[in-house]
Amino acid sequence: MVHYLTEQRGRPNSTDYRIYLKTSDGKYISPFHDIPLYVADEQECGVPPKKLKTNEILFNMVVEVPRWSNAKMEIATKEPLNPIKQDVKKGKLRYVANIFPHKGYIWNYGALPQTWEDPNHTDKETTCCGDNDPIDVCEISSKVCVTGQVIQVKVLGILALIDEGETDWKVIAINIEDPDASSLNCIEDVRKIKPGHLEATVDWFKKYKVPDGKPENKFAFNGQFKDKDFAIEVIKSTHSFWKALVMRQKMKGDEIFCQNTSLCDSPFKCSDAEASAVVQVAAEYGEPLAVSSEVDKWHFFAK
């Protein structure tokens, strides 16, 4: 099985806090570029497949924000190796407000690796450009995940948020380890088995910026969820945009870092030593309280 470790750097709840990902053999990787989008790509490398529906397409998901938490953690697309960090605005760490009756994020929130919503591409369905990030995922299982965890999910549908004039797709997915995973195969199954969950999702995204003094967000398709097939086509499209991104020959100014350790044809591929050097210059990990444990510095996840 494929395993990933996370290594913390800097002080938690500070602007220098970072979570780097590495493989089980100690090699640092980019969660944006080096983790395969499709689980099948890992199966070809000898990873045993999960026993689910025949022809079920499974995706890897990088968890950025655990359910019920408020810190806006995200993959740092404009930093070498793209560690996970807390978003900062006007010099202050960002937290989402509690939108009554919810507490923090109402799902495990994260991204699909090897996807990119191209800001130079106008989506024919939404008529808006992409938001320059990997595609977002709302994972609706009962388990609360951990920042940096990599899980396997199946896609159920998608919501088209229009955030300040940009297309910001929200994939609805379920962790395949969840007891309900075998029963959830489409967006209508979510309505039946988890009543109110989709309505709460629309309400949350509509209002989560209002406490910051901004207007309610808008949606394409009148806020209706599109089905699984539509969602997978959107994901495929963002995967194609990502491929073009990492294969370009030059990086301009304030652009996305495409440094990776696994893409042989990418001009941004670096050695393991170069990747390690990126992490070593980051601030040392420091506990926020007087509690310290070597085990606390590492998280081990199995896929």
Image (cartoon, grey):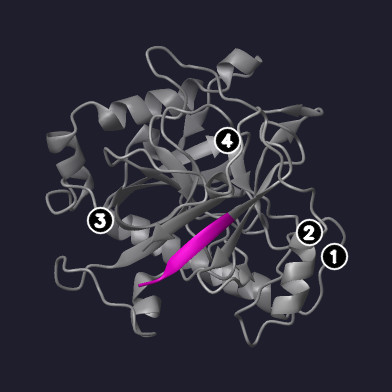
| 106 lies left or right of 276 | left
Give me the C-alpha separation between circle 1 and circle 3: 39 Å
Residue at disc 2, secondary structure:
loop
Graded by Cα atoms within 10 Å as few (under 14), some (14 to 19) or many (20 or more), the crowding at tag 3 reads many
Residue type of the residue flagged with mark 4: Asp
Residue type of the residue flagged with mark 3: Ile
| 106 lies left or right of 177 | right
Residue type of the residue flagged with mark 1: Lys
Q: Position of residue 138 (x, y in %)?
A: 40, 42
Does label 2 or label 3 sit earlier along the sequence? 3
Graded by Cα atoms within 10 Å as few (under 14), some (14 to 19) or many (20 or more), the crowding at tag 4 reads some
Height in image: 30 above or below 76?
below
Q: Position of residue 292 (x, y in %)?
A: 61, 38
- Hey, which residue is sitting farthest right in the picture? 253
Residue carrying label 4: 163
Residue at 44% x, 39% y is 220
Give me the C-alpha separation between circle 4 and circle 3: 29 Å
Does label 4 or label 1 sit earlier along the sequence? 4
Residue carrying label 1: 252
Residue at disc 1, secondary structure:
loop
Residue carrying label 3: 176
Number of marks present in the image shown: 4
Residue type of the residue flagged with mark 2: Glu
Does label 4 or label 2 sit earlier along the sequence? 4
Q: Nearer the viewer, mark 4 or mark 2?
A: 2
Residue carrying label 2: 255
Where are the magenta residues, as a range? 1-6
